[in-house]
Amino acid sequence: MTPKPAAHPGGAPVRASALHHSHHRATRRGFLYTRTGVWTVRIVTFVILIVAWELYASGVSRALFAPPSAILESIIELTITDGTLWGALAISIGALIAGFGLAIVVGVLIGLFMGRFRTLEYVLDPYVSFLYALPSIALIPLLVIWFGIDTELRLALVFIAGVFPVIINTMAGVKNVDVELLDVARVACASERQVVTTVVLPGAMPFIFAGIRVALSQALVGVIVAEMTAIITGLGGMIIRFANFFQTANLFVPILAIMVVSVALTAGLKRLERRLMPWDHRHAEEGA
């Protein structure tokens, strides 16, 4: 008697040939497609870049192009010897977190109301679109007149740079919520608050986080631009001061600090997104 093929819990037979073909495809991907292979390529590329940089910079004036060895010395000096970097970093991050947090709260609320109420969308959409398209750096002279050249200027510029991507993406997410889910909630006699908290916000969450990621980069640009053009403090102020005296090796230190802050905040946002949206299949693919 011929044995029956194995079946999975749903009752459909599992074909041995399909499983073998799938396994063959996975093994055929090669070393470069594995996590170890990816990191090997990254590390080797980084080493080659640093060696080539060091060799080229050794024949160029350090005022024009500092070698990695000199940059490493500057990192040690500014972080350990005198610790100048930490004070500037605290100033910039403090303004970024405060302004960016306010932009997220205000942006989500306005985007939520614009997505739920058509009249409000008609009224606010032209202004949101105009201010989003306007480069925030063009507002610096006006903001200096209004807020002076202190912390308030940084907060205002970070808020303006970050709030509009959050508004636009939140509104788009609210308008793209599955209509059938909204109908089910109405049939269940859910209140507007219940509809928003249990259907609208979870459904719009991918759009909201997409807007937050865009807003983060623009907010970081905003705080650095404010520090470079008006306040001359924080990481942006360090860049201007070192550039004025052609201290190229020192100049790279705040630039690298900005890169590290950006990568760390982006990674934190991804982690928060995975925690708040465990149902999103994209996170499972990223962690695989």
Image (tube, rainbow, N blue to C red):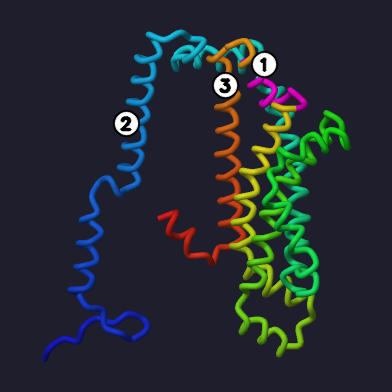
Residue 179 is one of the magenta-drawn residues: no
Give x and y (percent) for residue 42.
36, 36
Which residue is under mark 2? 44
Q: Is residue 255 above or below residue 131?
A: above
Which of 88 and 115 lies nearest the eye of the viewer? Answer: 115
Secondary element at tag 1: helix
Which residue is under mark 3? 253
Q: Is residue 197 above or below residue 147?
A: below
Give the label, 2 or 3, closer to the camera.
Answer: 3
Give the label, 1 or 3, closer to the camera.
Answer: 1
Residue 231 is one of the magenta-drawn residues: yes
What type is the residue that disc 2 sits on? Val
Mark 1–mark 2 CB contact (< 8 Å) = no
Q: Dot 3: few (<14), some (14–19), or many (≥20) neighbours within 10 Å?
A: many
Magenta stretch: give its range.
Answer: 230-242
Q: Dot 1: few (<14), some (14–19), or many (≥20) neighbours within 10 Å?
A: some
Query: Hey, which residue is sitting farthest left in the picture?
Result: 1
Which residue is under mark 1? 241
Give x and y (percent) for residue 72.
50, 16
Give the label, 1 or 2, closer to the camera.
Answer: 1
Q: CA distance from mark 1 to mark 3?
A: 12 Å
